[in-house]
Image (cartoon, helix red, strand yellow):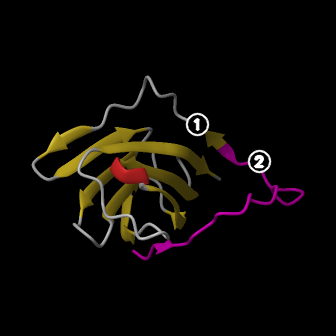
Amino acid sequence: MSATAEDHRAPESPSAAGTPPEQSSTPSAQEQQAVQEGNNWVLSDQGVEVRVTPQDELGAYVAISVTNDKDTSSDISATVRVRGDNGFDERYTFAFPDVPSGTEHGNSQMLTDIGGTPAPENLDIDIVAVTRS
């Protein structure tokens, strides 16, 4: 059960010829409702659950899990954006290659603001895009 997190800030290249196109979706803001559970903020949408915990001066700790509800193995990626007080605004793309059908995979990452902005107390979390191929 290996999953790697990769930072994909550049646009992704189109699918290679002869392979099915990627299924990409951008969740609407109306579908997403982050809720606070203790010190964590939790957001679930489209088989993706994101948990974000502010880490004082360090940034925001993001844990993510994805579920493959397709009948075949899938490569899944999810881009998460965390915004908040004092101009904190970071995004990260988590990549989960070859997730078997009916399974769940997870990973985590510490997001730090390049300008040194401390972690926000009030968070706004978005699942920017989910891609399954």
Q: Could you say where residue 46 lies in the image, as x and y percent from the top left?
A: 44, 38
Q: Which residue is mark 2?
A: 21
Residue 21 lies in the magenta stretch = yes
The residue located at (32%, 42%) in the rendering is: 43
Q: Could you say where residue 44 lies in the image, as x and y percent from the top left?
A: 34, 40
In this rendering, would 82 be left or right of 120?
right
Q: Which residue is mark 1?
A: 26
Residue 19 lies in the magenta stretch = yes
Residues at circles 2 and 1 in contact by the CB criterion of under 8 Å: no
Answer with mark 2 or mark 1, whichever residue precedes in sequence: 2
Residue furthest to the right in view is 17
Q: Secondary structure at mark 1?
A: loop
Label 2 – label 1 distance at C-alpha: 16 Å
| Residue type marked 2 | Pro
Which is more toward the observer, 15 or 98? 15
| Circle 2 residues within 10 Å: few <14, some 14–19, many ≥20 | few
Q: Is residue 111 above or below residue 124?
A: below
Q: Which residues are magenta?
A: 1-23
Which is more toward the observer, 78 or 85? 85
Dividing the picture into quadrants, the one containing residue 73 is bottom right
Q: Could you say where residue 111 lies in the image, as x and y percent from the top left?
A: 40, 67
Residue furthest to the top in view is 30
| Circle 1 residues within 10 Å: few <14, some 14–19, many ≥20 | few
Q: Secondary structure at mark 2?
A: loop
Locate the N terminus by quadrant. Answer: bottom left
Q: Please tell me whether mark 2 or mark 1 is closer to you in this view.
A: 1
In this rendering, would 11 be left or right of 45?
right
| Residue type marked 1 | Thr
Q: Is residue 25 above or below residue 80?
A: above
Q: Could you say where residue 59 lies in the image, as x and y percent from the top left?
A: 33, 67
